[in-house]
Image: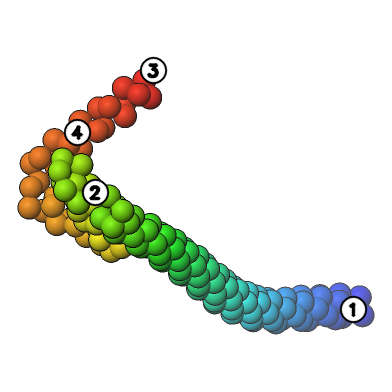
């Protein structure tokens, strides 16, 4: 009987050990699930923060590019305005000199006869040309624009002709 009792005790202790092992395994499983869930949340939060940081960085880079493009556009506009102003000043100075030449021709040229009339025509033409040049490049561009608006068909035909001549010149 003692042997049977010992066997029952061993079987009972094995059964208690098995139950303890199962309980420990269940507890370990629950702990692993909890740890995995927490790790998943941390990964999600980290990914979310990384995404926000990437968006912020991209936004800043976009703003920097916009600012640089705006600066380049402004500098280009300033340079173009400066060039137009210098061209206007130069043509105005040439116009003044041409008008002065017309006055000199009137003063020093003959006043009567065929040469007098020729001098008067040349002086009038130079004075008219000088007035136009004094208006500058901007004034001439405005006149050209107005002429094209008043006479669009001839302007288009002239443009086609000039384009044809340029094409022939570069084709050779």
Horizontally, residue 71 falls left or right of residue 45, namely left
Judged by depth in the image, the label closer to the viewer, 2 or 4, is 2
Report the front residue among 113 and 33: 113
Q: Indicate which disc residue 172 carries.
A: 3
Compare marks 1 and 4 and give the one earlier in the sequence: 1
Q: Determine the secondary structure under disc 3.
A: loop
Q: Indicate which disc residue 160 carries.
A: 4
Compare marks 4 and 3 and give the one earlier in the sequence: 4
Judged by depth in the image, the label closer to the viewer, 1 or 2, is 2
Compare marks 2 and 4 and give the one earlier in the sequence: 2
Q: Are marks 4 and 3 in contact (CB under 8 Å)?
A: no
Residue under the image location 20 percent in, 31 percent down: 161
**Where is 15 relative to 111, above or below?**
below
| Res 131 seen here | yes
Q: Are marks 1 and 2 in contact (CB under 8 Å)?
A: no
Q: Determine the secondary structure under disc 1.
A: helix
Q: Position of residue 25 (x, y in %)?
A: 72, 76
């Amino acid at each position: 009987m003692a042997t049977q009792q010992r066997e029952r005790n061993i079987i009972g202790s094995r059964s208690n050990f098995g139950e303890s092992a199962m309980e420990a395994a269940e507890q370990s499983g629950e702990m692993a699930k909890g740890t995995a869930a927490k790790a998943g949340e941390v990964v999600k939060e980290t990914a979310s923060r990384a995404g926000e940081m990437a968006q912020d960085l991209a936004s800043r880079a976009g703003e920097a590019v916009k600012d640089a493009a705006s600066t380049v556009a402004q500098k280009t506009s300033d340079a173009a305005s400066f060039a137009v102003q210098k061209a206007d000043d130069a043509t105005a100075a040439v116009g003044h000199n041409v008008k002065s030449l017309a006055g000199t021709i009137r003063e020093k040229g003959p006043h009567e006869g065929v040469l007098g009339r020729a001098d008067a025509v040349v002086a009038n033409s130079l004075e008219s040309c000088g007035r136009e040049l004094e208006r500058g490049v901007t004034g001439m561009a405005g006149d050209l624009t107005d002429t094209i608006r008043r006479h669009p068909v001839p302007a288009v035909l002239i443009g086609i002709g000039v384009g044809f001549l340029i094409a022939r010149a570069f084709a050779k």
